[in-house]
Image (tube, rainbow, N blue to C red):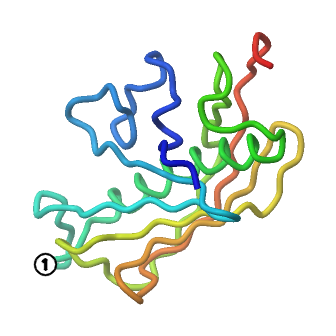
Amino acid sequence: MSTRAIQDSYPPEFAHCYGCGTGNPHGHHLKSYLIGGETVARFTPDRRYTGGVPDHVYGGMIVSLLDCHGAASAAAFSGQKDERHVGDCSQPIRFVTASLKVDFRQPTPLGVELVIKGRLRSLEGRKAWIDLTLSAGEVTCAVGEMLAIRLQDPTCC
């Protein structure tokens, strides 16, 4: 496991993301880590992220967490395939979301740590398919499927 979050390797021009950007003082600063064959992030939403069901997270927050974690996961899995590590190169591997399908399975409680996990389904050329889960304790609250596209990095490695 790398002790450095995937997002910490993003250069300043990619560090503005509200969900995971280290350079956004108002953002969530989500941190994702590659641990063996999966990626893991942890986040505890506070009361301002309440949804239509009292004491539960609104759906947009859940999608945002899955989105940021999924793109970071695609970068990590692509780097792993290329035998590169987070921060190895002056031009890091970056992916953007092409599509994201989310199924909400259970209401997601506020004020508890959420665990977001990603697993690589397939990696073909610039396309990465990532399977995602978001859980509160032992309860899987949402699952997602992401297609992420690798940005061109002609000056890298």
Disc tally is 1
- Residue at 47% in and 75% down: 142
Three-letter amino acid code at disc 1? Pro
Q: Is residue 26 above or below residue 53?
A: above
Q: Nearer the viewer, residue 105 or 69?
A: 69
Q: Is residue 41 above or below residue 92?
A: below
Q: Quadrant of residue 98?
A: top right
- Residue at 79% in and 43% down: 127
Q: Is residue 125 above or below residue 52?
A: above
Q: Position of residue 125 (x, y in %)?
A: 88, 39
Q: Quadrant of residue 82?
A: top right
Q: Identify the residue position indicated by label 1 in the image.
A: 54
Dot 1: few (<14), some (14–19), or many (≥20) neighbours within 10 Å?
Answer: few
Q: Secondary structure at mark 1?
A: loop
Q: Position of residue 35 (x, y in %)?
A: 60, 61
Quadrant in which the C terminus is drawn: top right
